[in-house]
Amino acid sequence: MSETDSAEQTALALVSRIAEGDRRAFEQLFESYGERVFRYAHRLISDVTKAEEVTNDVMLEVWKTAARFEGRSKVSTWILGITRHLALNAVRRKTLDTVDVDAAPEISDEGLTTGAVEHDRGVLKDAVRDALGRLSTDHRDVIELTFFQGLSYGEIADVVGCPENTVKTRMFHARKQLKGFLEAAGFDPDAVEMAS
Amino acid sequence: MNRREAEELLPWFVAGTLPEDEHQAVKAFVDSGEISKAELEEVALFAETVSVRGADEPAFNPALIKNALDQLDGITQEPPEVPLVVGEVGANSGARGQIGNERPGLLARLLDSLQWSLTPPMARLAIAGQFALLLGIAVLVATTEAPTTDGAYETVSGSVGVLQADLSITFAPGIGEADARALLLERGLQIVAGPSALGIYQLAAPATADLGALANALVEDPRVIFAQPVPQP
């Protein structure tokens, strides 16, 4: 059994115990998933206080509905799905400004790299982080779930509640927009050396 | 898989979450150079940036855990949903009902196929209402007893019960309905059954009638060719 499978089995066992009212199991699950939930919520909401509220609400929802979890998806997918739902509700309340997808600049498919070094990697990462913050929620969401939460495109489709092809399309456009934002911020795609 | 498809899957290739067959297919495009090193590194940069916490990102506050634990007592845990059909348990699965080892029950699969989770709440309410109405009608039809007709029947003027056949008669050929009705009214007779294959009617006579005399009188009538009392049990 792989490490991932083992972690999933552990999480399943915890959810089963939570369904029976086991507070210790709840605490263990919170310790395992709390940071992931908080980070995901924060990156969707960009507000620490609200992200903490969402994290709290997500875990209480897990406590409340654990008995209804049928194990048809991974525990992480289930919890992240709840997180996304509650976080987006918080975003709507906050009326977070996001960038209009159609208005976002897009550039060619050529890579960002292959040039002389003009910016160090740290600066570039900061720029990427800024650019991520300017993506629409749907696009940032797919990138976040892929690279931070480590979900497959099928699992993302479950969390987000859309077809797999939509996930792929969102990712495709998110990447193009990121490149566009970086270029607009003065990062010449041909002048950035990506290698560490 | 074409290049466009491989390019779409590149982020999950970098993240290491592709199934083995797709991973190999994308790898072939990378190895052949059809997907450039620059493109791969660009995705790797995004992945690396997202996967680590930025310096300005807040840290998770462990106090949230205690805070949530303090709230648990005020929350009622929901009971498990009872499916119409218990999930099918695989041969190698663990104990029955163990989370994660069951296939979804019939209800869950039906809801899946109806995309119930994507249906707006008001539409769900409307569908559920219609279903409840149909179910109610079905139950009503199934449980409502049919009117009892054994041993009695109803006329507009009221219940007359089952009349006993007192006489058997055959009308003369060519006698129309009006003539037959006139004869019956004259004698106070009612048709109980008939005609049979031979054209014989069963008639009920007034309770005070002398059935023998009545039969003889009917035989004498030109509108009747046969009449005789029905043997009584």
Image: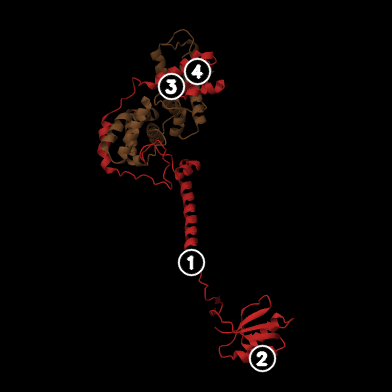
Chain colours: A brown, B red
State whether residue A177 appears in this view.
no
- Picture residue at 47% right of the left edge, 62% below the top: B143
Residue B138 is left or right of residue B96, and the answer is: right
**Of callouts 1 and 3, which one flags the residue occurring earlier in the amino acid sequence?**
3
State whether residue A158 appears in this view.
yes
Label annotation for residue B27: 4
**Of callouts 1 and 2, which one flags the residue occurring earlier in the amino acid sequence?**
1
Same-subunit check for callouts 3 and 2: yes
Label annotation for residue B145: 1
Q: Amino acid at mark 1?
A: Glu
Q: Amino acid at mark 4?
A: Lys
Residue B85 is left or right of residue B218, and the answer is: left
Q: Amino acid at mark 2?
A: Ala
Callout 4: few (<14), some (14-19), or many (20+) C-alpha neighbours within 10 Å? some
Name the residue tied to disc 2.
B217
Q: Which x, y percent locates residue A152?
A: 44, 27
Residue B157 is left or right of residue A38, and the answer is: right
Disc 1 to disc 2, C-alpha distance = 46 Å
**Of callouts 4 and 2, which one flags the residue occurring earlier in the amino acid sequence?**
4
Kind of element beneath mark 3: helix
Q: Nearer the viewer, residue B138 or B129?
A: B138
Callout 1: few (<14), some (14-19), or many (20+) C-alpha neighbours within 10 Å? few
From the image, state whether disc 1 or disc 3 is nearer to you: 1
Same-subunit check for callouts 4 and 3: yes
Q: Chain of mark 1?
A: B
Name the residue tied to disc 3.
B15
Q: Chain of mark 4?
A: B
